[in-house]
Every structure is written in C-alpha cells, then in structure tokens.
Image: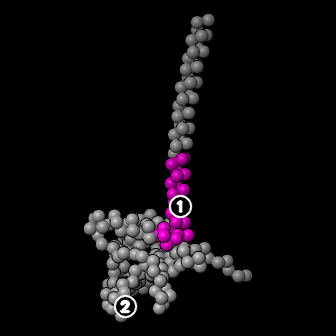
Amino acid sequence: MKKYAVSISVAAIVVVAGLTVFGGSNQTTAIENSISHEKEQKMNHSDSAFKNMTTKTYLSNYNSIRDELAEKGIHTLPFALELEKKTNFYRFYYPKQENSANEKAIWVSVMLSGDQKTIDGIMYEGVPDVHTVKAMIQATGLIWSPELDQFIANTNVAKTPKEMIVSGVKVTIEGTPAQIKVMVDPVKLEAPKKL
C-alpha cells in the first residue's frame, strides 16, 4: 500500500513538473508571439505612415527631428507650409530674398492631394544640405537604416536619377556636387491595367 501511495505521489510530481515546464514553454511562446506581432504592427504602421500623412503631422515630425539635431549643434532649414501665390505651389521652405537664378538658392516644395491636407510628395531642390534632406525624409515616419544613410551620403554624385524604396517611401536623388534634387513620395499602388 505504501509503495502504491509513493508511486501515485511520484507520478503526481512528474505530471505537475511536466505541466509547469510545458506551461512555462507555452507562456514563453505566447510572449515571443506577442513581441513578434507588435514588431509586425509597427512595421505595418511605418509601411503606411506616409501614405495619408497630413502637413500638420509631417511638420510636427520634422520640427521634432530639427529640435533634436539643434541640441547636437546640427542646423537644418526651418519648414513652414505656405502658398507661393505667383506659382500657386505650396512650399515648406523658400527664402523670399532668393530666387531660382541664385546659385545658392534652396527650396522645398510640397505637393498636396486633392483634399489640400495630405501630402502627395515633397521635393528638395538646390545646393546640397544633407542634414535637412535627412530630416525631410525621416519626418515621413520611415525607419532609418545604414543603407539609406549611405544612399543619402552619395547625393552629390547622382548625375542620373537613383531611387530607393524604404518603408513605403520612395526616395529619388539626382544632381551634382553643386545642385541636387531629392524627391520623396509615398509609394502608391499602380492603377489596374486596361485589358
């Protein structure tokens, strides 16, 4: 009878230990799945961040990056949305005292969607200002990478347009050491082809 009771006790301990181990394993797997799902959600969020971004959100992002850079002693251009009445183009940066004939002119134009609130594209044109270009791109919400950093670092040798797509954002660069054009666009789905 004692042997029988000991056998039941040992069996119970083995079952409890087994459940604890497997339960812990399931809990660990659940935590890993949760973390993986959170990463996926963040990735999906960043993939679509620029597709419906308003100018207000964009400027808030840009100014936040600009403030962080200023604390490190890095200067970037001040962006503000304004309408150039002569051309009817919206601009983030366009110094009034300069014009396109000036060799050192810089301007940043923004194309808006039909609602006049969401951004359809941004274009930097003028003398290279790598810090402003980086901040301009980062403000779209994409996750910065060493590859993108390298891509931007080579802006002054892109005589023919080069393109990179990161987190749903298309970046196109062309120019010379004296003058560059950088375009940033949300990646759109292509319209279905007609049969």
Q: Are marks 1 and 2 in contact (CB under 8 Å)?
A: no
The label on residue 6 is none
Label 2: element kind:
loop
Q: Nearer the viewer, mark 1 or mark 2?
A: 2
Q: Name the residue located 56 percent from the left edge and 38 percent from the top edge.
A: 26
- Name the residue nearer the viewer: 186 or 33: 186
- Seen in the picture, residue 83 relative to 41 is either above or below; the reply is below
- Seen in the picture, residue 156 relative to 103 is either above or below; the reply is above
Quadrant in the picture for residue 2: top right
Residue 32 inside the magenta-drawn segment: no
Which residue is labeled 2 in the image?
99
Q: Is residue 93 visible?
A: yes
The quadrant of the image that shows the C terminus is bottom right
Q: How is the image coloured?
A: one colour
Percent from the top left, x then y, of residue 193?
68, 80
Which residue is labeled 1 in the image?
45
Magenta-colored segment: predominant secondary structure: helix
Look at label 2 and name its amino acid: Asn
Q: Could you classify mark 2 by the number of other residues whose Cα lies within 10 Å: few (under 14), some (14-19), or many (20 or more)?
A: few
- Name the residue nearer the viewer: 138 or 173: 138
In the orientation shown, which residue stands out farthest toward the left?
73
Percent from the top left, x then y, of residue 113?
57, 78
Look at label 1 and name its amino acid: His
- Seen in the picture, residue 56 relative to 25 is either above or below; the reply is below
